């Protein structure tokens, strides 16, 4: 098993999920905010979900991280890369359940996307966003992603909007991250 790398930004730590993250993640999945990402879920289902997040790292060599604020330890979100069999292509996604409205999703999304491009050599990413998830749409736009014309219809989650992130080349040529 390869270790999951830890990433740091100015305000955040992105690290491997741990079992002690389950209560905070379960509280999010019990809330109305989880309606856009397959919720609500019970605590035992969240535990299984975090096991899937860890398994994704082993099967794909990349995945999602638990997000912590450097100011206060403890899980505040799950952000990173996702490419299961039923997804159209690799995506960068985010759930922030504590400290929303402070730019954490954008900051962590930048870090995850940079890891995808700079470390993994990926050249493009999407974000799939449920209709009506205005907060996630705003995050995608702040990351420079643009709405694709075609939707993605997932067998479980239904119709999802696809947002295309700037490519690694576009960013290198002075795109959105050059000025972040």
Image (spheres, rainbow, N blue to C red):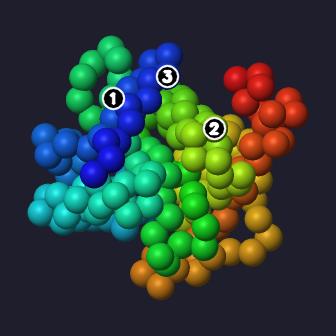
Q: Mark 3 points at which residue?
A: 9
Front disc: 2 or 1: 2
- 133 relative to 177 in the view: left or right: left
Indicate the position of residue 169 as horizontal and vertical percent values: 82, 42
Dot 2 lies on which element?
helix
> Is the C-beta separation of discs 3 and 1 under 8 Å?
no
| Residue neighbourhood size for the residue with mark 1, other residues' Cα within 10 Å, grouped as few (<14), some (14–19), many (≥20) | many
| Residue neighbourhood size for the residue with mark 2, other residues' Cα within 10 Å, grouped as few (<14), some (14–19), many (≥20) | few
Does 135 appear above or below 15?
A: below
- The residue positioned farthest toward the front in the image shown: 1
Q: Mark 2 points at which residue?
A: 118
Does 71 appear above or below 81?
A: above
Front disc: 2 or 3: 2
Rounded to the nearest whole Å, what is the CA distance between mark 2 and mark 1? 22 Å
Quarter in which the C terminus is drawn:
top right
- 137 relative to 16 in the view: left or right: right
Rounded to the nearest whole Å, what is the CA distance between mark 2 and mark 3? 15 Å
Rounded to the nearest whole Å, what is the CA distance between mark 3 and mark 1? 10 Å
Dot 1 lies on which element?
strand
Front disc: 3 or 1: 3
Look at the image and tell me whether residue 138 can be seen.
Answer: no
Indicate the position of residue 10 as horizontal and vertical percent values: 50, 16
Question: Is tag 2's residue or tag 3's residue first in the polypeptide sequence?
Answer: 3
* Residue visible at 58% across and 81% down in the picture: 153
| Residue neighbourhood size for the residue with mark 3, other residues' Cα within 10 Å, grouped as few (<14), some (14–19), many (≥20) | some
Question: Is tag 3's residue or tag 1's residue first in the polypeptide sequence?
Answer: 3
> Is the C-beta separation of discs 2 and 1 under 8 Å?
no
What is the number of the mark on residue 68?
1
């Amino acid at each position: 098993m390869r270790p999951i790398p830890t990433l740091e930004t100015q305000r955040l730590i992105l690290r491997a999920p741990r079992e002690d993250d389950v209560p905070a993640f379960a509280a999010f999945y019990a809330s109305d905010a989880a309606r856009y990402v397959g919720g609500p879920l019970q605590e035992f289902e969240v535990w299984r979900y975090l096991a899937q997040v860890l398994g994704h790292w082993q099967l794909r060599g990349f995945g999602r991280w638990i997000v912590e604020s450097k100011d206060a330890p403890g899980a505040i979100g799950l952000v990173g890369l996702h490419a299961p069999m039923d997804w159209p292509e690799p995506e960068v996604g985010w759930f922030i359940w504590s400290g929303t409205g402070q730019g954490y999703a954008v900051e962590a999304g930048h870090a995850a996307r940079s890891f995808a491009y700079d470390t993994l050599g990926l050249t493009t990413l999407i974000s799939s966003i449920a209709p009506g998830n205005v907060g996630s749409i705003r995050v995608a736009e702040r990351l420079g992603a643009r709405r694709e014309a075609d939707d993605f219809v997932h067998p479980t989650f239904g119709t999802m909007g696809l947002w295309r992130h700037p490519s690694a080349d576009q960013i290198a040529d002075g795109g959105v991250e050059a000025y972040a």
